[in-house]
Image (cartoon, coloured by chain):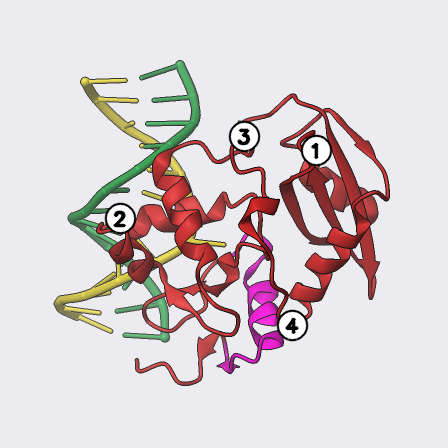
Chain colours: A red, B green, C yellow
DNA sequence: TGCCCGCCGGGTG
DNA sequence: CACCCGGCGGGCA
């Protein structure tokens, strides 16, 4: 099963257009997990609590939840990686860490392929890169939606490919039928 | 295009 | 240690 962290966290939510965003904060007052938007507040909170069962809900961090929503809807928001409690998050192995840090560098409005991420790590493990990205505890903020397949197809996403396409389109990326419009292949 | 098989890191028992 | 399983790639029909 998925690994759990039993330290207490605080969860805040934000609603926009019938989508509910949630963010979990550790005791260090850093972000420990972000939920992809859900159709109800309960589902959004559960996206966090399945990994962090000890929690309380407050509006203390709802500004951050709103920031996540803004990024989702296409705003280019700057953030500092120090806002993240990577150490207490569900990221375990050095490989997962390297992948996440590499993904964090992908600028707004651009994409990289799974293979390119592997290459940047001096590795051929593009298959494992996909797996590691799938575990990203900070979706949207760490832009795993900006990692696509080498053939120009958009590829998989924890929140479903359609959601990935939507976020990329919100960033101004041109996509036709689940493929990059200007893909060479 | 779609499929199939190879690839690599991690989780499981 | 020996599987098994993925947000993948590339070759080939």
Q: Nearer the viewer, mark 3 or mark 1?
A: 1
State which quarter of the image contains the C terminus of chain A: bottom left
Pair 3/4: label in front: 4
Q: CA distance from mark 3 to mark 4?
A: 30 Å
- How far across and down, in percent of the image, does residue A176 sit? 50, 82
Using the image as rendered, state which of residue B5 and residue A122 is in the foreground: A122
User: Residue A172 at what x, y percent from top left?
Assistant: 57, 80
Q: Which mark is residue A125?
A: 2
In the rendered image, residue A106 lying in the magenta stretch gets the answer: no
Image mark 1: chain: A
Crowd class of label 1 (few under 14; some 14 to 19; many from 20; radius 10 Å): many
For label 3, count other residues whose C-alpha is less than 10 Å away and answer few (under 14), some (14-19) or many (20+).
Answer: few
Q: Position of residue A50 (x, y in %)?
A: 66, 32
Q: Give the extent of the magenta segment.
A: A157-177
Q: Earlier in the sequence, mark 3 or mark 2?
A: 3
User: In the rendering, which numbered label is found on residue A49?
Assistant: 1
Report the front residue among A185 and A137.
A137
Give the CA separation, mark 2 to mark 1: 31 Å
Magenta stretch contains residue A164: yes
Q: Is residue A82 visible?
A: yes
Q: Are marks 4 and 2 on the same chain?
A: yes
Q: Earlier in the sequence, mark 4 or mark 2?
A: 4
Q: Which residue is mark 4?
A: A74
Q: CA distance from mark 4 to mark 2?
A: 31 Å
């Amino acid at each position: 099963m998925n690994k759990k962290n039993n330290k207490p966290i605080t969860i805040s939510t934000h609603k926009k257009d019938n989508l509910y965003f949630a963010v979990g904060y550790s005791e260090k007052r850093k972000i420990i997990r972000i939920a992809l938007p859900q159709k109800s507040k309960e589902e959004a909170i559960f996206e966090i609590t399945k990994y962090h069962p000890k929690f309380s809900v407050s509006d203390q961090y709802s500004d951050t939840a709103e920031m996540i929503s803004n990024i989702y809807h296409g705003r280019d928001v700057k953030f500092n990686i120090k806002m993240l409690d990577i150490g207490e998050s569900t990221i375990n192995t050095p490989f997962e860490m390297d992948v996440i840090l590499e993904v964090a560098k992908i600028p707004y409005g651009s994409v990289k392929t799974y293979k390119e991420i592997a290459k940047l790590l001096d590795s051929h493990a593009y298959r494992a890169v996909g797996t590691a990205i799938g575990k990203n505890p900070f979706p949207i903020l760490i832009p795993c939606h900006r990692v696509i397949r080498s053939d120009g197809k958009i590829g998989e996403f924890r929140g479903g490919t359609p959601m990935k396409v939507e976020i990329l389109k919100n960033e101004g990326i041109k996509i036709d039928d689940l493929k990059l419009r200007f893909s060479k292949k």
